[in-house]
Amino acid sequence: MVELIITENESKPEITISNQIKKFAINGLYGFNTIILIGMGRRLGIFNYLFEKAKSSPSSGKYNEVIFTPIELSENLNLDFTYLDGWLHLALECGILEISNSEKKILKTAPYVYDLLIDRSNEFYIGGTLGAFYYMAPAQDILIENFKTGNVWSILDLPGDIMRDLQERGARFGTLVERLFSKKFEFFCKNLQKRSIIFELGCGYGFNLETWAKKYKKARFVGIDIDPIALAHAKKLINKNNWNERIEIFEMVIDEFARFFKEKFDLIILNQVLHEMNTDENYRRDVFKNLYSLLKDNGILLIGESMIPDTFAPEKRFQLFDITHKFTEVKASLFYNEKSFREFIDITPFSKANFIKEGGDSIWVIKK
């Protein structure tokens, strides 16, 4: 009888140079080109066009797919056909599109692409996240300069179209926050459905307010932000939905608002806002003092935020999106992990902080 002994090194498959070529060259090239295609598809209006077409002619197949021709896209979007042909060919190679009928030159979206990249209301939509990654390439000049000088940049310095996409990505995260919160605090959310008043600090372009307002139809909402461009967009959303009597928004900082506003709130929301606050701890503590004063005694402060571990902490889960967030906003932002955030809450007036995690989603539920 021969005893088989496997050492620690032998238990792992050997990594060959061809493995690494595939990892860094082939997979990297497909990933990079896919991001470029998604970013351009959004900016050129291709994805919006396919979304509107899908609404007017629902798919009857197994997948939500959209069927179209290159000429149709070129004529309706006023795009140069030769350039468009190059985009479409690469989109086929990267698996975003498929050929529906080669003789008639008809294309269609690949399985689940409509749900993942085009339909912004779909629970699996990731187009906003991937669209935000698209802007990392032009932002690298700023990052390179900051690496050399240690300068700090402000997210408000970004162009309007980039800011809008980043806000949309944050709103997608906010949808997951609301879903997890309503699942874990069902009774509280039933009361929100009756008559309540909800405050969002850093409401930005209004995407997150829109999500909550559509679900909690009897609630009143108040939002504040310091970005006038974002608030102008939020006002358009409010007008579009006839919510002027339900939603108020103000361009002001939190301490000014706390002095000005007399009502107290059932729920206060910070969705991907905490890390963007002034990094000074005393400033942040003062913000939480104001939030404490604005919250009802039985109210909840709900925080959706990336909790990022220390660089050399053991990896316990998939962290790519969180660490990418840190990389793109490093030094301009201050992120917490679970331990450091609890330590921060200890220096605020709040006494109860509950970290709730399910799968890849997490929230902080904070009470007086």
Image (cartoon, helix red, strand yellow):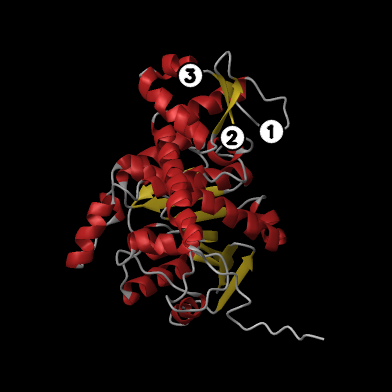
Image position of 102 (left or right of 162): right
**In the image, what residue occupies the spot 58% across and 39% down?**
121
Q: Give how far across and how far down residue 255 sits, in percent.
A: 34, 64
What number is the disc on residue 214?
none
Amino acid type, label 3: Pro
Mark in front: 1 vs 3 = 3
Among the two numbered marks 1 and 2 on one chain, the one whose residue lies closer to the N terminus:
1
Q: Give how far across and how far down residue 236 sits, in percent.
A: 42, 34
Dot 1 alpha-carbon crowd within 10 angstroms: few under 14, some 14 to 19, many 20 or more: some
Residue 109's image quarter? top right
Whether 77 is drawn above or below 156: the answer is above
Residue picked out by circle 2? 114
Residue picked out by circle 3? 70
Q: Which residue lies furthest to the left in this view?
A: 149
Q: Which residue lies furthest to the front in this view?
A: 1
Label 2 near label 1: C-beta < 8 Å? yes
Residue picked out by circle 1? 63
The residue closer to the viewer here, 284 or 294, is 284
Q: In which quarter of the image is the N terminus?
A: bottom right
Image position of 30 (left or right of 111): left
Q: Give how far across and how far down residue 145 sits, in percent.
A: 19, 59
Dot 2 alpha-carbon crowd within 10 angstroms: few under 14, some 14 to 19, many 20 or more: many
Amino acid type, label 1: Tyr
